[in-house]
Amino acid sequence: MIHPIDELLTLRDCLRYASSRFAASDLFYGHGTDNVWDEAVQLVLRSVNLPLENNTLFLDARLVRSERQLILDRLERRIQERIPLAYLLGEAWFMGLPFHVDERVLVPRSPLAECLQNRLQPWLGDQPVLRVLDLCTGSGCIGIAASLVFEDAEVDLADISGEALAVADSNIELHDVGDRVRTVQSDVFEAVKGRYDVILSNPPYVDAVDLAAMPAEFHHEPALGLAAGDDGLDIAHRILARAAEHLNPGGLLVVEVGNSWPALEDAYPDLPFIWLEFEQGGDGVFLLRAEDLASARQISK
Ligand SMILES: C[S@@+](CC[C@H](N)C(=O)[O-])C[C@H]1O[C@@H](n2cnc3c(N)ncnc32)[C@H](O)[C@@H]1O
């Protein structure tokens, strides 16, 4: 019997084969790509270190055997073990930037990337941004992207997980921002010091019902990055209770809570949440101003 490795000679062959195999499989997409074709392109091109854009020049170039073997091995693991492609490649993209990822951190996919690309306009106005906190940072993608958008800002990346912070440190090095960005091990705000102009957070927010129904791909992600109690709001409550103490006047708090947003609105009927809208997809991200948070502190006392 002829093995696929002997027949798949060119990049084009590999792309076609990977697409067909993905299409015939019951995979979940949503960890960086959202369809069969993009997943195949990412698997094949990034396995041979080619860029995802402007690559048609090589479509009919033949691959060497070791490259074909690597692509086939990753293809099988993606399908059989349902491992998110980002973990197989060791990289993910956030706001168009590469980040190291592995199973110690969630695969970056927050719509906060779009807010940052827009420099938090129109809400930020001309407020200077000199200190940023990325709470529950995981790979550090949100805070590091913020440091590249706000070039004068010092950025703290906080997470309770030392393992996640090791990945964040490797991303600080990757983006060469070690002079302005640092990691802090902290249980929510416990070890965070001082005030910030902007606090960004994509905390765990999956409720118990959603958690039980998640596709196999999510089981490769750290449970600490997803689960947040029965209603998914355990960490969000803690953020709201103490964010005001850590924001400068005029500062902004931007937090993703996904599907848990109706439960949050019910819990804080007096808070004037602004729910952000995204052209590139996603929802469940609120913005609050420092001045609005005082009432949340009253509620939690
Ligand atoms: C949903 S992941 C987000 C990671 C990253 N911000 C992103 O968008 O890809 C949530 C992160 O929160 C961290 N975390 C969970 N509980 C925490 C706590 N009590 N204090 C600080 N971080 C926590 C997890 O370790 C995980 O890295």
Image (tube, helix red, strand yellow):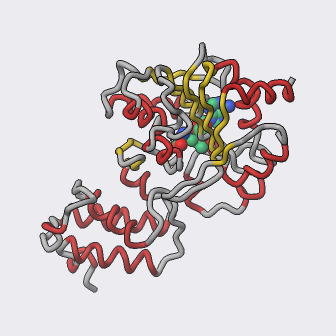
Asked whether residue 170 appears in the rendered view, the answer is no
The x, y position of residue 220, in whole percent, is 55, 52
Instruction: Give the residue displayed 39% in from the left and 34% down from the top.
Output: 149
The x, y position of residue 54, in whole percent, is 20, 61
Split into quadrants, the picture shows ligand 1 in the one at top right
From this viewpoint, which residue is outermost toward the top?
A: 194
Q: Quadrant of residue 40?
A: bottom left
228 displayed left or right of 277? right
Instruction: Give the residue displayed 37% in from the left and 62% down from the top.
Output: 74
Asked whether residue 144 appears in the rendered view, the answer is yes
224 displayed left or right of 113? right
Q: Quadrant of residue 88?
A: bottom left
232 displayed left or right of 5? right
Quadrant in the picture for the N terminus: bottom left
Instruction: Give the residue displayed 45% in from the left and 38% down from the top.
Output: 119
The x, y position of residue 229, in whole percent, is 78, 44
Give the total number of marks visible in the rendering: 0
90 displayed left or right of 235? left
Quadrant in the picture for the C terminus: top right
Q: Considering depth in this image, is 42 or 192 the residue closer to the camera? A: 192
From this viewpoint, which residue is outermost toward the bottom?
A: 1
Q: Considering depth in this image, is 96 or 140 the residue closer to the camera? A: 96
From the viewer's perspective, is residue 110 above or below residue 24?
A: above
Instruction: Give the residue displayed 49% in from the left and 49% down from the top.
Output: 107
